[in-house]
Amino acid sequence: MLYQIYETQRSIIEPITDLAAVAAKLYANPLSPLGQVPMAQRVSASFDLLHRLGKDYEKPEFGIRTVDVDGVEVAIHERIEIDKPFCELRRFKRFSDDLPTLDKLKGQPVVLLVAPLSGHYATLLRDTVRTMLKDHKVYITDWKNARLVPLSEGEFHLDDYVNYVQDFIRYLQQTYGNCHVMSVCQPTVPVLAAISLMASRGETAPLSMIMMGGPIDASKSPTAVNNLATQRSHAWFENNVIYRVPPKFPGAGRRVYPGFLQHAGFVAMNPDRHASSHYDYFRDLIKGDMSSAESHRAFYDEYNAVLDMDADYYLETIETVFQEYKLVKGTWDVKNPEGELERVRPQDIQGSALLTIEGELDDISGSGQTAAAHDLCAAVPSGNRRHFEVPGAGHYGIFSGRRWREMVYPVVKSFIQDYQPATGSATTAPARKGGTRRRNSTTPV
């Protein structure tokens, strides 16, 4: 019932926010009669803020049209390579008419970037993608809003997430010979499970695994997110945050964890920070600081855009990752597409190099949670494993912004290159026992 109440309220507010947007423009326009009234700029800023606080935020675009590759502007074309009921495998294909640049692009590593399915859209990794495109062929998992997936498409479980990742890895292996896999936050757990299962079956493993800020072992340095999951029972989550999609959407009747509830939770973690940010935006509009105002809009256009998660997937993630720690305890069984249960055994991974990355100030995935992957992947030679803690970085800083571009990306790029076969060589990199290059910014594990 809460979902229906929310949608009714949103429908009522929508005309008001639309009028607020019009009023903001009228008061801001010096050629308008309203733009001549006293305090017109302040009134315009008030209406603009009202519009942004009440408007509905749709899924943003990646909007990556070009990237600079060594001084050459390379065109980017987005296209869907695989379309599954709950996820699209999206490719960012690069084009250039500069022949030396084109030859360079053809030989670059292939990276599967697994985006989180934890509230925000995959566009949250826009900066990650844009930076990676300079030196890599990039594919990303673009998860769908569950309220837009009809009930006829069936259920979506954590097991399905794992199976999706395996399908995407196999597709890239068939297309290019092999690939590297990079997971950010939530997907570190299902990605490690997917690669573990492939290794246990004797399938070709990805060349490398880059795991960033994820809850591999959520019992280490628990954060507020971890504590909420452990302090509430499975029944509490099912009774308090799970609702059915209203009739107006294609996924009507599907049980979901609604995006608006997730957004409320995000804001509740730092309410003072968000209130201060909106007040600063209001002041920037009054001062005419359009650059700062636009930065605020860009951030909140992304931050306020949230999707519904299928209830089965969400509840199973809470139980598996944050309550029972099945991955680290070795008790996690995943159902494959044939309906058979397979035990997740990270200790079976041998041929994939492992890089873990954590932010020093991460308040989402605490210190040591991601690094725990090294203990689980004990069969990976120590020379093929590295850990990097990013000084001064919070959760988002490890994959977006200046620290990502200047501190994290050089480490990621170098690590991938270390395990990328030379052009024309075998498709899998040999195990390097202590033979990889060491850098001051990374710690061998």
Image: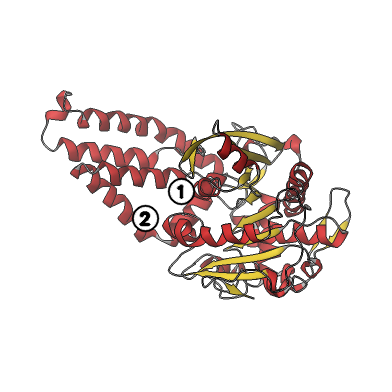
Quarter holding the C terminus is bottom right
Q: Position of residue 178 (x, y in %)?
A: 75, 50
Residue nearer the viewer, 12 or 198:
198
The amino acid type, in three-letter code, at marker 2 is His
Quarter-wise, where is residue 319 in the image? bottom right
Q: At x 84% / y 48%, what residue is drawn? A: 337
Residue 414 in view here: yes
Seen from the viewer's position, the closer of residues 97 and 173 is 97
Residue 2 appears in the figure: no
Q: Quadrant of the N terminus?
A: top right
Helix, strand or loop at mark 1: helix
Q: Secondary structure at mark 2?
A: helix
Front tag of 2 and 1: 1
Position in image of residue 58 (x %, y %): 49, 37
**Residue 296 higher or lower than 203, as above or below:** above
Crowding near pointer 1: few (<14 within 10 Å), some, many (20+)? some
Residue at numbered disc 1: 303
Q: Residue at horizontal 47%, vertical 53%?
A: 264
Upstream in sequence: badge 2 or badge 1: 2
Q: Which residue is mark 2?
A: 274
Tag 1: amino acid:
Tyr
Please, which colouring scheme is shown?
secondary structure
Q: Residue at x 58, y 60 (%)?
A: 414
